[in-house]
Image (spheres, grey):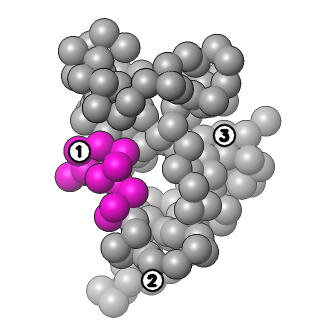
């Protein structure tokens, strides 16, 4: 069973903002990456179909499928983890999440469903309306 990661998307205001930043920093059609200080010890479980769930404005809103986890060493000599992800952002059913540092594991059973799943609902809502509902805590 897949094990996911969850991480705060610091400085990003919306899914559209995340998409725009990704397009600017990583143009093209290939995978994208995010570098973090700590490496998952449960690497095999994460690579068995896991995703990185992004928390935007204290709400889990979107995920990206994890392709690989690569150990890298920065220019400062510190070891880091490069999380390689599929470029596609998959919207999820919004779920509030309190702030935390770094990343955390997220069990598949605890992950919010994709908006494209029949259980999620709301896939037809315009982005601005969805954002307002999330801000109000109504969704």
- Percent across and percent down for residue 125 are 43, 24
Element type at mark 2:
strand
Looking at marks 2 and 3 on the same chain, the residue that comes earlier in the sequence is marked by 3
7 and 120: which is toward the camera: 120
According to the picture, the residue beneath numbered tag 2 turns out to be: 73
Q: CA distance from mark 2 to mark 1?
A: 30 Å
48 and 27: which is toward the camera: 27
**Quick check: 51 above or below 39?**
above
Q: Quadrant of the N terminus?
A: top right
Element type at mark 1:
loop
Q: Quadrant of the C terminus?
A: top left
For label 1, the crowd category at 10 Å Cα-Cα, with few meaning under 14, some 14 to 19 and many 20 or more, is few
For label 2, the crowd category at 10 Å Cα-Cα, with few meaning under 14, some 14 to 19 and many 20 or more, is few
Q: Tell me the residue at 27%/13% (across/down).
A: 137
Q: Tell me the residue at 35%/25% (across/down).
A: 130
According to the picture, the residue beneath numbered tag 1 turns out to be: 13
Q: Tell me the residue at 24%/23% (across/down).
A: 132
Q: Tell me the residue at 67%/46% (across/down).
A: 50
Q: Of the residues tagged 2 and 3, which is closer to the observer? A: 3
- Residue 70, by quadrant, is bottom right
Looking at marks 2 and 1 on the same chain, the residue that comes earlier in the sequence is marked by 1
Q: CA distance from mark 2 to mark 3?
A: 25 Å
Q: Of the residues tagged 3 and 1, which is closer to the observer? A: 1
**Quick check: 11 above or below 31?**
above
According to the picture, the residue beneath numbered tag 3 turns out to be: 3
Residue 46 horizontal side relative to residue 8, left or right: right
* Residue 123 falls within the magenta-colored stretch: no
Residue most extreme to the top: 138
CB-based contact (under 8 Å), mark 3 and mark 1: no
* Residue 20 falls within the magenta-colored stretch: yes
């Amino acid at each position: 069973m897949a094990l996911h990661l969850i991480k705060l998307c610091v400085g990003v205001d919306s899914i559209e903002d995340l998409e725009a930043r990704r397009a600017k920093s990583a143009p093209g059609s290939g995978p994208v990456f995010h570098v973090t200080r700590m490496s998952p010890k449960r690497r095999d479980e994460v690579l068995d179909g896991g995703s990185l769930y992004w928390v935007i404005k204290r709400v889990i809103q979107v995920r990206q499928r994890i392709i690989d986890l690569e150990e890298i060493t920065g220019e400062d000599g510190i070891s880091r983890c490069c999380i390689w992800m599929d470029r596609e952002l998959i919207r999820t059913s919004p779920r509030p999440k309190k702030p935390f540092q770094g990343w955390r594991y997220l069990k598949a059973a605890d992950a919010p469903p994709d908006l494209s799943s029949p259980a999620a609902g709301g896939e037809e809502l315009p982005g601005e309306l969805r954002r307002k509902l999330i801000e109000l805590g109504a969704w």
